[in-house]
Image: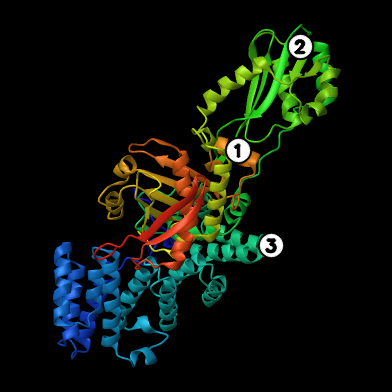
Amino acid sequence: MAKKKKKSDKATPKRSPVQGIPEFPDRRLLEGVMREWVGKLAPGNENTPLAKAQVMIDRAVGERNVNRRVQMAREALEICPDCADAYVLLAEHARTRKEALSYYEKGVAAGERALGADAFQQSVGHFWGMLETRPYMRARLGFAHALWVAARRDEAIQHLQDMLRLNPNDNQGIRYTLAGFLLFLDRDEDLALLLRQYPHDASAAWAYTKALLSFRQHGDTAETQQLLAAARKTNKHVPEYLTGEKFPPAEEPGYYSPGDESEALNYVGSFLASWKSTPGAIAWLRAKVKKPKDSPQAKGPLGFIKKWLTKNLPQEFDEWQADFRVLPNWVRAAGVSVRPWALLVTSRTNDLVLTHQISEERPTAALVWDALVEAMQKPGAGTPHRPTELQVRHDPTWDSLRAHIEEIGLQLTTCEELDQLGHAFQSMIEHVCGTPQPGLLDMPGMKPDQVGKFYEAAAQFFRLAPWKKVGYEAAIKIECDHYQSGPWYAVLMGQSGLTSGLALYENLRYLQRMWSEEVGDEESARETIATSVTFGEEWDCAIADLEACQKYGWQVARPDAYPVVIHKERGLSVRPALVWELELVEGCLRAIPEFITRRKQDDPTREEMTIPATSGQLKLVLSWVIEEGGR
């Protein structure tokens, strides 16, 4: 028997993670019924060209055949060119983003003509309350989004702000779209005003956005913590997706319910980029929601255990070795990537592993002592006994345990290397972690100085965040005579928040097919050839790169902005960049932010830039990819 839903489980239309625009077909169908009903109560206007065109659109909304819907929209415009909803339908089925932008703009103009100037003076404050205003408001919301994806960000925000002036009741949920846009552009003061405009909004989107804004403005204060606690009460699932403990599914839910995971996915889709762009926000959130762990404690009174070992366990000639080391790969544990520590105790005399332990954190002296006691009392092989000697590497932990170890009759010897235990560690590493990922310095001919210059360029690129200045599905053509291959097509990542960085594709046609969704994710993964640099937390790096970064002091913009550069071949194989590929990526990281500042996306000018590189001066020619008709 189906479980009966509670009243609070009522589904709410989902807003697109990018657009923030609700799905309208059902609402439009209902409006058509309402118009018919109003026409019967107050006849007189049903024979105007606009009314006839609107009837055509009301029928088109319910039409399943896309070609027929488009045809009906065109027929409606032939009846009346002031039918804004006809332009909205055409925009929804446009072939390119540029075409959609044009249709929405025409729809806004048509709506303004149909309403007349007086409506914008007399109906301010309750605009949505009149049926005749809704086609205009739909067209304007679509236009605002189309402006946003075309990188005309300030214009998009101005439209949304004015729509809230016209209709502060916000029946369309415009405030959520506007909040996401303002956060993305770091317009915190404007966002604070918007939040104050709707003080009684109890949604998870509003609650988590309040907490984020407080953290951006004031840091980890008591008030910020209270706002986060209140937000978690509205929806407990949001932090799991923001921190990466859970990954969004490939298919997004069509509707969301308050407090449900679907609502969390809706929020993350719109606001993840802003959380990630806020220095320290994700780490702060992770720390606040992380469950506290019990610290390892000694299993019993130390004095009693030492007396028991000395009295009850015989001592046999046996050389033991013990050590604890961090493993050379990341392991996922409880939704968080960690570098586990392994603790081993072995018998060098008998070539046996006596005990082993894995922990997420560096073993404490208490944990190390317990491991030694376990090796003596319950060894993994052989009979219980005390050894004669314990060989260790130099570490303060052993210094703190020296007196206790010697008190039970063991000789503690410090060695430079632990030969037998080293082999056991290597075997454990291969079993637990597999083969460690190669780093940049493992590639032929790669030198620390070149990698250091790449890290410097990547840090500056991240700080400038050029992805905030470009529209969706935009590519920059990169030409360079210094290399035999090319050209490349640079795509900036960072608007969704899932990944930020830069990708250099080798095939423009295939890139365009990906944009138009002619190819699926699986085929895209197989066929794409690209060199990319993405930014992430330290566990996103190969351990070899992380250790080299610490050793050579390479520059990193933020703790969550370690650059990872890889080259993907056709198929699913990836590898670190080669020397020339890293040089090309470095040149692009330095040139693209400046190019974007000077050249708008509709500017076809080719610009030559000379960039210092490892092999000398690197000449790059950059130009926007502008298609016939435009995307």
Residue visible at 56% across and 61% down in the picture: 231
Residue visible at 30% across and 41% down in the picture: 527
Query: Where is residue 512 drawn, in percent x and y?
Result: 29, 54
Count the marks: 3
Judged by depth in the image, the label closer to the viewer, 2 or 1, is 1
Q: Quadrant of the C terminus?
A: bottom left
**Direction from residue 400 to residue 335 in the image, left or right:** left
Determine the image quadrant of residue 229: bottom right
Which sits earlier in the primary sequence, circle 3 or circle 2?
3
Residue linked to disc 3: 222
Determine the image quadrant of residue 630: bottom left
Q: Is residue 408 visible?
A: yes
Element assignment for label 3? helix
**Direction from residue 178 to residue 217 in the image, left or right:** right
What amino acid does circle 3 point to?
A: Ala
Report the disc number at residue 262: none
Element assignment for label 2? loop
Q: Tell me how far mark 3 sits from mark 2, CA to CA.
A: 54 Å
Picture layout, residue 323 above or below residue 58: above
Residue linked to disc 1: 548
Query: Where is residue 526 drawn, in percent x and y?
Result: 32, 40
Task: Give whichever of 19, 608 is nearer the camera.
Answer: 608
Q: Residues within 10 Å of mark 3 (few under 14, many from 20)?
A: few
Picture layout, residue 400 above or below residue 131: above
**Direction from residue 520 to residue 47 in the image, left or right:** left
Task: Give whichever of 429, 73 is nearer the camera.
Answer: 429
